[in-house]
Structures are given as structure tokens and as C-alpha cells.
Image: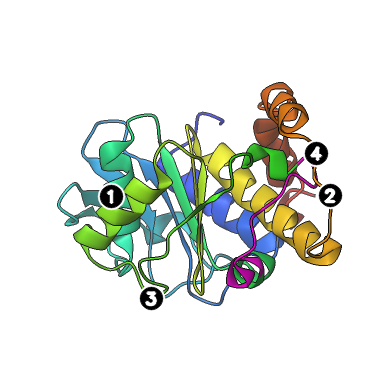
Amino acid sequence: MSEVSPQQDIVIACRVLEAAGQADMVWGHVSVRDAQGRGLWLKGSNLGFDEVQETDVVLLSWDGEVLEGTAGRHIEYPIHLEIMRVRPDVNAVVHTHPLYSVAFAATGRPLLALSHEACHFVPPDIARFLQTGDLIRTPVLGEDLARCLSDRNAVLIPHHGIVTVGTELGRAVAAATHLERACQIALLAGEGAQPSADEEALQKRERSERHLTMAWNYLARTLPENS
């Protein structure tokens, strides 16, 4: 990531997600861990990804209190706080409701290594949070979601959406776009599709780790306002 403020990073991430087709009116949110350890920076509520400005980003304490900023706090802030609380390696969290990911999760089928994108998540099969498809609005549900995610980079929430994480915001955003494409390909291929062997899929993952950063850099620099 470039050396910009967390507010700037979140605005860019929101624009990238909107351009990638992951907007859902005013729902969906992005967060970045506060460098000073105070908590995390979160996109403000009641705003679309295309509307968010730097002044619409709030700083939350580890108790969920707004320390800086005047925008509203998303109800599902526990997703971000509880994942970052137990994952010191995670510095960014993305939660969206992308079309193909939601549709694929509803099938109950395992995600297969049918494409390079899928190999970032499988094998083994991608984590699925099955406790509820409703809003993750309490610390307890946030803790349960973090436990389901474990040490992975993504989790499907059937009947709801996805959560992706990363060591930096760009990687979490790119993981969200890669997961959506992997789910789209899985739906197009159908139930009889033949995946890569596990060994090959894992080799692809190891060789393409830097691709998430490369994808983020491309998506960010090709935003309409940058063209």
C-alpha cells in the first residue's frame, strides 16, 4: 500500500469494490487496523462505496466506541473488531454481499480449484459460517465468525455475504474480487466440473501470493477518476 492515511486507503478500497461490482447500495464495509493500536478505522454507515469520503471514516476503540469521526458506525462492526482482536496478522477486513459469492454459497457445494483465483482459497474447502445468515451484530457472533475464519483469508456466510482479510487493505480487497470471480466460474462450470489436483492448486497458491498485491495495484490505478 502507498503511504497514505487510513481514511484515504479506505476511500480507495471502497471505490475499487464499487468498480468491481461488489456494491450493495449502502451495505458493506471496509476496515484498517489503527497503527497506534487504538482500534480500527471503519467506513461510515449509510453510505455507498461510491459515496464515501475521508471524513466519512471513523476510528473505533477495541470496545466499539467512536473515538474519531462523525459518521455513523456500521451495526456489523463486531466482524472487524473480533477478527482483528484474535488475528494480529490481519490489518484489514472487507465485508461485502457480492452476487456470485452469495449465489454459490447458497448451493452448499464445495468451492473447487477450477481457476487461478480459486487457488487462493482452496484446498481445503473455503470456510463457511453456518451459525447465522443474519447480521453479525454482537461481539459473540463476531467471535464465532473469527473462530470459523481461523487462519484463512476468507469465509463465506451463506445467505449473507463474504468476509476477506489481509495483512494490508489491498490484499483483503483483492481477495474479495478473486473470491467473487472464483464463485462465478464455479457456478458457470456446474457440479460436474473437474478441479486441479490439490498439489497443483497449492503450487499455484504459493507462486501467486504476490498476485493479490498486483491485482490491487491494477484495480486502484485504473479507477475512473485516475484515468
**Image location (x, y in percent) of residue 161:** 52, 66
Residue that badge 3 annotates:
134
Residue that badge 4 annotates:
196
The Cα atoms of the two marked residues, 3 and 4, are separated by: 34 Å
Q: Contact, CB < 8 Å: mark 2 with mark 3?
A: no
Q: Earlier in the sequence, mark 1 or mark 4?
A: 1
SS class, disc 2: loop
Residue kind at label 1, given as amino acid type: Leu
Q: Residues within 10 Å of mark 2 (few under 14, many from 20)?
A: few
Q: Main secondary structure of the magenta part?
A: loop
Label 3 vs label 4, nearer the camera: 4
Q: Residues within 10 Å of mark 4 (few under 14, many from 20)?
A: some
Q: Is residue 81 left or right of residue 209?
A: left
Residue kind at label 3, given as amino acid type: Asp
Q: Is residue 42 left or right of residue 100?
A: left
Residue that badge 1 annotates:
81
From what the image shows, is residue 96 above or below residue 151?
below
**Image location (x, y in percent) of residue 134:** 38, 75
Q: Earlier in the sequence, mark 1 or mark 2?
A: 1
Quarter occupied by residue 220: top right
Label 2 vs label 3, nearer the camera: 2
Residue occupying image coordinates x 71% and y 33%: 198
Magenta residues (range): 104-116
The Cα atoms of the two marked residues, 2 and 3, are separated by: 33 Å
